[in-house]
Image (cartoon, grey):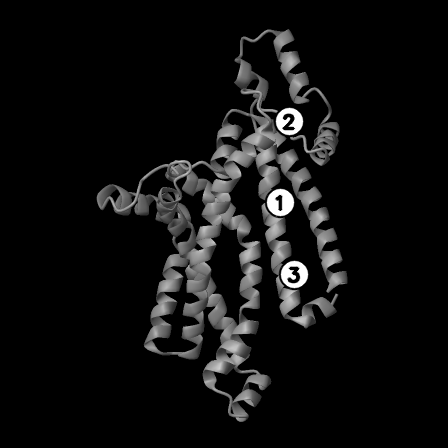
Amino acid sequence: MLAYTIKRLGLSVVITILAITLLFLIIHMIPGDPVSTMLGPKASPELRAALEEKMGLNQPLPVQIGLFFVNMLRGDLGVDVFTNRPVSQIVFGQLPYTLALIGTAIGWSAPLGIALGCVSAVRRDSFIDRLTGILSVSVIAVPAFVVSLYSLLFFAVQLKWFPAIGAGKSGDLPDQIWHLVLPAFAIGLSWVGYIARLVRASMLEILGENHIRTARAFGLPENWITFRYALRLAILPTITVIGVGMGFLLSAAVFTEIVFSRPGLGKLVIDSITTRNYPVVMGSVLFSTLIFVASTTISDLINALADPRIRNST
């Protein structure tokens, strides 16, 4: 397990470097001049040159990438060109809101999806199985931003059950949780259906394997076989999907944070791209990449810990 962990962590470092480099190039390929956006088209050449030097835009692109990695290792992500605040301070101020949103979405959707998938597999071709299949496919097909809009209009505007915008009062945990309900519902709804279908398929495959038939032949209780043997293996692909799906949750969080006017990394990235605020964009993208890489690494390690075949195959 130690050797597998070291290899997986090394691969994560390589993936992070390549991803950040690619994203750095993509961001600098976005049309528009950040200096003109910030200073206006009538700024003097001296003022433009000073701002370009401050942002490092006067250096060749490979040098800019190298300086970014060097400064990143020092913990320096630069400063906001508008407020002169450290980028790390700005990002860390928004990061908890996005993590809370994603964590809540996974926290309610994954257990419900696993439970529905398990029931569907155990009661195959029953009414519950067919109903779960129809509902799962239906919610998978609806994008998160559509769910966000209709949730906002119906539950917040029309019924007034939940707050429409914001993240709640600072320091008031119940109010923050209340503001989190609709956004987390909008992001997690499609994952309920996706996880349910995945768990059902995995459970049906495992319930037909030889060791399950052997357990039944020894007279073990069906519930014990289902939850102790079958579900333990069937849930492994779900763990992987949740880890990989963190990137999709981050992208869904962008639209949800905009619809509900919530603070977070997604809204910060959009606002920074609009103003061509490169240091804040790169800081936000860096932490988004780290979240995605960390989630996939953790899911792989959990799978390797639960299934010796994974760690012994490398």
Residue 205, given in percent of the width and then of the height, sits at 53, 77
Vertically, is 83 above or below 204? above
Vertically, is 133 above or below 10? below
Q: CA distance from mark 2 to mark 3?
A: 33 Å
* Helix, strand or loop at mark 2: loop
Residue 143 appears in the rendering: no
Task: Give amino acid for label 1.
Answer: Leu
Q: Residues within 10 Å of mark 1 (few under 14, many from 20)?
A: some
Residue at 53% over, 19% down: 37
Residue 32, given in percent of the width and then of the height, sits at 56, 24
Vertically, is 171 above or below 81? below
Residue behind mark 1? 290
Of residues 115 and 85, which is closer to you in this image? 85
Instruction: Tell me which numbered mark, 2 or 3, is placed earlier along the sequence.
Output: 2
Residue 89, given in percent of the width and then of the height, sits at 57, 31
Q: Quadrant of the N terminus?
A: bottom right
* Helix, strand or loop at mark 1: helix
- Asked if the residue under mark 3 is in contact with the one under mark 2, i.e. CB atoms within 8 Å, the reply is no
Vertically, is 155 above or below 282? below
Instruction: Tell me which numbered mark, 1 or 2, is placed earlier along the sequence.
Output: 2
Of residues 24 and 187, which is closer to you in this image? 187
Residue at 37% over, 74% down: 129
Residue at 45% over, 73% down: 118
Residue 181, given in percent of the width and then of the height, sits at 36, 49
Residue at 43% over, 69% down: 115
Which circle marks residue 78 in the picture?
Answer: 2
Q: Is residue 139 toward the left or the right of residue 279 in the image? A: left
Task: Give amino acid for label 3.
Answer: Leu
Residue behind mark 3? 301
Q: Count the marks.
A: 3
Q: CA distance from mark 1 to mark 2?
A: 18 Å
